[in-house]
Image (cartoon, grey):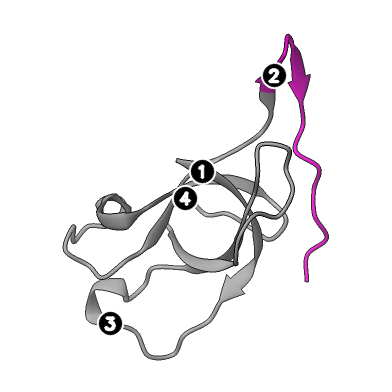
Amino acid sequence: MQFARVLGRVVATVKQETLLGIPLQWIQPLSARGEAAGKPMIAVDRIGIGPGETVIYITSREAAVTLDDPFAAVDAGIVAKVDWVFVDGGRVDPAPARAR
């Protein structure tokens, strides 16, 4: 599991049948310090996330487990929204990014 910030929603008028009705989000992976780490990617969103929110996502074969069809062609799936993190004895609120 890794942290990411949602950059925005991806709109696709044509999708693989196993992805029909499933929202797609454009996410930016984050380092432990909350800085951009790596290239942005697309992830399926079954929990209803919006731009600027910090999420936890999974990749590889496990990403398809977030869908009704576990054999869907998916590389990343959002599994949780991060409200805050407890680090070194204190609460850290993820800094909201500006929606693009």
Q: Are marks 1 and 3 in contact (CB under 8 Å)?
A: no
Indicate the secondary structure of the residue bearing disc 4: loop
Kind of residue sitting beneath label 3: Gln
Q: Are marks 3 and 4 in contact (CB under 8 Å)?
A: no
Q: Which mark is residue 16?
A: 3
Q: Kindly identify which residue carries mark 2.
A: 87
Q: Kindly identify which residue carries mark 4.
A: 47
Q: Position of residue 97 (x, y in %)?
A: 80, 55
The answer to whether residue 41 is magenta is no
Q: Nearer the viewer, mark 1 or mark 4?
A: 1
Q: Kindly identify which residue carries mark 1.
A: 2
**What residue do we see at 51% from left, 43% from top?**
2
Q: Please state which of residues 6 and 1 is positioned toward the viewer in this rendering.
A: 1
**What residue do we see at 46% from left, 85% from top?**
12
> Marks 3 and 4, how far apart in space?
20 Å
Instruction: Say above or below: 88 vs 21.
Output: above
